[in-house]
Image (spheres, helix red, strand yellow):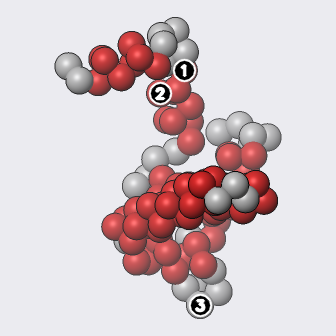
Amino acid sequence: MDQSHPIDLLYARLESRRSAGTGQSYTASLLAKGKTECARKVGEEAIETVIAVTTHDRTAVVKESADLLYHLLVLWLACEIRPAEIYAELATRESQSGLQEKAARRT
């Protein structure tokens, strides 16, 4: 893990909070509720981000996007997915257009 990338730094911090008490760490409390609750929170934050965009509230978009990224990383942690796996998947898509990538998913 590249400890200098902000996503990696946040992931490492979240990982370290996994073993904290649920009364002391929001991250630990989310993880204790399981993958389904973590996924629900990602959906909630995604909706809040979309609402911020549709109301043209730039500040809210920034804040909700940060919340969305945080909850997505918690979900990755709950699913035992490391950021490097996501980076590798993104790298495989660099040589093709988004339309090509979407078409390849259908097969």
- The residue under label 2 is 89
In this rendered view, identify the residue nearer to me: 3 or 51.
51
Q: Earlier in the sequence, mark 3 or mark 1?
A: 3
Residue at the far top in the pictured view: 95
Dots 1, 2 in contact, CB < 8 A: yes
In this rendered view, identify the residue nearer to me: 63 or 39.
63
Dots 3, 2 in contact, CB < 8 A: no
The 10 Å Cα crowd at callout 2, few under 14, some 14 to 19, many 20 or more, is few
Name the quadrant of the C terminus.
top left
Q: Residue 91 sits in which quadrant?
A: top right
- The residue under label 1 is 91
- The residue under label 3 is 23
Q: Kindly identify the amino acid type of the residue bearing the numbered disc 3.
A: Gly
Mark 3 or mark 1, which is nearer to you?
A: 1
Query: Which residue is depicted at the point 58% across and 85% down?
Result: 21
Question: Does the image show residue 104?
Answer: yes
Query: Which residue is depicted at the point 48% across and 66% down?
Result: 44
Q: How far apart, in angstroms, are the residues tagged by discs 1 and 2?
A: 5 Å
